[in-house]
Amino acid sequence: MRMKSTSLGVIGIGLALAATGGPVIAQQASGQANVVRPSPTNQDAADTHPLRLASYWAQDKPKTTPAPSKPATRETTTIRTEVKTVGEFGYREISSFFNIREANANVDKGEWELELESGWETGNGGDDDVFFGSSLKYGLDDATYLELEVIPINLGDGGGQGAGELELTLFHQWTSESDAPAAFATWASMRIPSGDGSEGVDGTLNGAITKSLGGNWRAHLNGYVMTANGVMGDGDDANRRDFQWGIGPGLDYQFDVDTIGMINYINRSADQNGESNDGIMEVGFVRKVAENQHLKFAVDVDVHGGNDDIANVGAKLQWTIEW
């Protein structure tokens, strides 16, 4: 009887468990999504079993707000360069190699310039001459330079020319077109009787004005006065004119940054007393051949033709280098 009661009690407990746990087991087995899942926050506050592992769905994870992005920045680097353009104020290599030069200084402070010159000319008296000369300049500042020149002599004519004669020149530019209506410069030259058989000292004061006309054109005006107190070599000192002068205009045109052409005219007194003035027309050009090197060429024509000592036609070439 006791065994029968015990069996009935076991069966009754089993039926109760089946009645209460069956739906839960069935629901978990079906995998339906309508199961109410506690939020992580509430679960953490009420969970009395800290060692129990909880499963989280993607939507259960806390959402974080991304940090605001920094505005994009762009770095700009400015490179400053200097380019010499056509029509810019400044020296354009129209130097004392030509009969009429510009008023801008040849060299800057601390800069050197070497010039080597040669040429040919035929005189009214029928004598052809070939000559050679050289000069060296040094910039005392951006507007002032000192020059030492070996005065050209005729090759093949032998002695008596005063070979080795020197000329010392001090040049200063007083104004520039960047701060004045025109560029203006003066330079003083002194012939030193260092040549063979030379005597006396000649002094010359020169002046030049340069004005840009627009359209790559520039105009120049030169003038000089000279006191002649000696002679080179065995020249005619007795008949030499003591006071001499010259004046003339010039034009140049810059074709591009490397090429410039020029034309000028000078009217000057003759070296000897009793002779007429000289009038010389000159046409030339300058070409840049390297970063600091130039070639200069010119043709001179005596348009008066009255003096045997003056070339009827002449051509000359000069190479310059700066450093």
Image: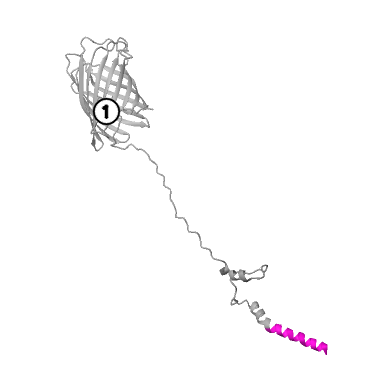
Residue 11: x and y in percent read: 75, 86
Residue 79: x and y in percent read: 40, 42
Tell me which residue sits at (24%, 20%) in the image: 205
Characterize the magenta stretch by its predominant secondary structure: helix
In the rendered view, does 102 fall on the left or right side of 57? left
Tell me which residue sits at (26%, 15%) in the image: 202
Q: Residues within 10 Å of mark 1 (few under 14, many from 20)?
A: some
Q: Is residue 128 visible?
A: yes
Q: Is residue 92 above or below residue 275?
A: below
How many marks can you see? 1
Residue placed under numbered mark 1 in the picture: 174
Residue 113: x and y in percent read: 35, 25
Q: Nearer the viewer, residue 145 or 99?
A: 145
Residue 9: x and y in percent read: 77, 86
Classify residue 86 by image quadrant. Answer: top left
Classify residue 242 by image quadrant. Answer: top left
Tell me which colouring the rendered structure shows: one colour
Q: Is residue 279 visible?
A: no
Tell me which residue sits at (36%, 31%) in the image: 289
Mark 1 secondary-structure assignment? strand
In the rendered view, does 242 fall on the left or right side of 23? left
- Residue range highlighted in magenta: 1-19
Q: Is residue 194 magenta?
A: no
Q: Nearer the viewer, residue 281 or 182?
A: 182
Classify residue 88 by image quadrant. Answer: top left
Q: Nearer the viewer, residue 193 or 182?
A: 182
Quadrant assignment for the C terminus: top left
